[in-house]
Structure formats: structure tokens, C-alpha cells
Amino acid sequence: MVLFINKKNTPFLFLLLISSFWAFYYLSSNAFNDYGVEKSEWFLLIDGLIVLPLLCFWCIKNKKEAAIKAIAYCCLVVLLGSFIIPESSKLIWHYLEAGRYIVLAAFIVLELTTVITVIVAIRASLSNKEDPDVAISSPIENILGKGSVSALLSFEARVWTYALFSKKVVKQHFLGDMHFSSHMKDGAQSNQLGFIMVILFELPIMHILLHYTWSPFAANVITFLTLFSLVFFVAEYKALAIRPISITPDSLIVRYGIWSPVTVDLFDIKHIKMNSEYVSRAKNIRRFNVSGNPNVEIKTHDGDFIYLGVDAPFELVTEIKKRIS
């Protein structure tokens, strides 16, 4: 909670504060609003459409990110005002309610343009024999800078890259002088393919069942969401066989499926050994394994554990032991 309260998150916290206060103000009758007599729209307009955008540009260094958040927050404020401000108190709010759709359409066009630009940049980078992870994240970070938003978009870009352009990704282009795969362990990739086939088989049956027992609209929405989630499973299935776990001269890079890579400094490794037992979840444990029990245990000097499921565990353990010794 403490980490969430920082300067960058101040606009969002301010949005929550004014939303709660003004919702109480407009929807109740109390001494603040002269017992329902004074409910002017100007109060929310000043806080939500003037103070809040200025706060975004003051608290967020990246001006593009600040502008995007300011527009999004203003649209939310207008939406909130359309519900809580009494109709008799609205003078210009009706115009704002109509205008937010124009802003939303412009925002969607801007984001689609950005996405297309990023896709083109990623395909060009992949063709230049650059590390595929760098090729995917660099165009996004060049636009948005490093941060939680760019990390989320990089993850989404990896999903679409491996779902649509997996043939463009060459395993040998990944950073590292030794690569280890993980897709054959305990039939990990085969199990994923089976799971995808089950979804495809039951999808039309589920759609027809929901269409006649619930509603056509609900059936269409759930089918669309299922197809959208299927993109993730297909990308994970392809990425598992392509993205390796790699050793560089001074680090171990753990890439697993489409998730963000984890880099472990070889000098931070206290010990590494074979493992055959089940590993339960814990705060100091990270597991990178799809099927069966992980077969490699890594313990860092900080007391954290990393468990891997790889196709050649003995070779990986032997190589890292040789390097850290």
C-alpha cells in the first residue's frame, strides 16, 4: 500500500477522492449542499476537468503518458457527473456528455495508430537479428519510457508477436552463449496443445447452449472473450518452444512462455541442484514449470528460491556450477 502512494499515482488517488466526495455531495441532502438546494455542476467541473488534468502533468514526467491519463480521467469524470449531477443542475454537462464520445473515438484512433507503428517496428527489429525480447520492448519503451505501463504493453506485444509472427523469432538470436529448452519436459507443450484443442471443441457447444438457455448477446460476449483468451494460450504454446533459458558470462536469463524474462546474476546464486519434489507456492519462491515437478532448484544469497523445469537439467546445473565456482 505504501508503494502505491507516490507522486506518480497522486492523480489517480485524487480522482478516487473527488469521486467519493462529490458523489456523496450530489446524491445526498446535507449541510454541505444547503440540504439539497445547492448542487451546482461547477464544483465537479473545476476539480475533475481543470485541477485533475493539471495534476497529471505536474506529477507524471512522461508528458505523453500524462496526456493519455488526463484524457482518460476526464472522460471518467464526465461519465460520473452524468450519473450523480441532477438534471436540473446541468447547464454545460449535456455538451460534455456528447463530447466524450468524440474524445473516446480520437483516443482509440491514436492508440490503434500507436499499436500499428509498434508492430511494424517490432517486425523490422526481428528481421535485424536483434534479441527478440529487446526487439519487442524497445519500440514501446521509446514511446512510453520504462515503467509499469510499458511493461504491460510489452507483455501484450509478446502475446501478439508469438501468436501471429512466431516464425519471425529465431531462437539463436536470443542473448546468451548457451540455451536450454523446456517445452519437452513431461510433455509440457503437448499438454498445452491438448488444452487448446479442448477449448476449440467445446466453444461451439458452449455458444449454442448459452444462446438458447440464456441470451444471444451473452453467448456472443462469452464466445468473444474465450476467443480472445485463446490468443494467449496459442502464444504461450508457441513461445514455450522458442524462448530459451540462457546463460551469459555473468547471468542466467529465465524466459518461460510469454512472461517477462527474469535475470539472475551468477554471483547471486548460493547453490543450484537437481530437484524431483513438488514445490508449493510461497512468497520467496518463483516457479517456472508447466508440467510435473520442477527439476532444478536455485537458491540466491537473499534466501529466495527459483525452480525451473527444463529438458536438460543435469547439463544446466553442471554448467552453472562450473561458472559460479
Image (spheres, rainbow, N blue to C red):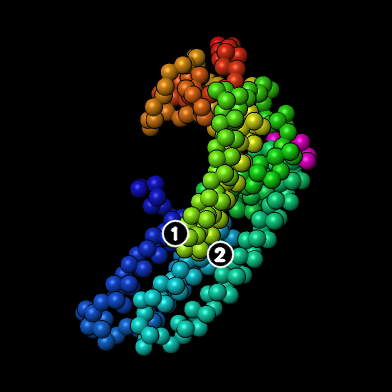
Point out which mark residue 168 bears: none
Residue positioned 61% across, 65% down in the render = 108
Q: Nearer the viewer, residue 194 or 134?
A: 194
Query: Does the stretch in magenta take in 78?
Result: no
Residue positioned 62% across, 61% down in the render = 111
106 in relation to 314, above or below? below
Q: Is residue 80 left or right of residue 260?
A: left
Q: Is residue 127 left or right of residue 278?
A: right
Q: Which residues are magenta?
A: 127-131
Q: Is residue 258 left or right of residue 80?
A: right
Secondary structure mostly seen in the magenta stretch: loop
Cα separation, mark 1 vs mark 2, equals 45 Å
Point out which mark residue 67 bears: 2
Q: Secondary structure at mark 2?
A: helix
Amino acid at pointer 1: Thr
Residue 324: image quadrant is top right
Residue 22 visible: yes
Amino acid at pointer 2: Ala
Q: Nearer the viewer, residue 57 or 256?
A: 256
Residue 247 visible: no
Where is residue 253? Give x, y as percent.
59, 28
Q: Residues within 10 Å of mark 1 (few under 14, many from 20)?
A: few
Where is residue 227? Give x, y as percent.
57, 51
Where is residue 190? Give x, y as percent.
59, 30
Residue positioned 66% across, 32% down in the render = 242
Q: Nearer the viewer, residue 70 or 51?
A: 70
Point out which mark residue 213 bears: 1
Marked residue nearer the N-terminal end (1 or 2): 2
Q: Residues within 10 Å of mark 2 (few under 14, many from 20)?
A: some
212 in relation to 150, above or below? below
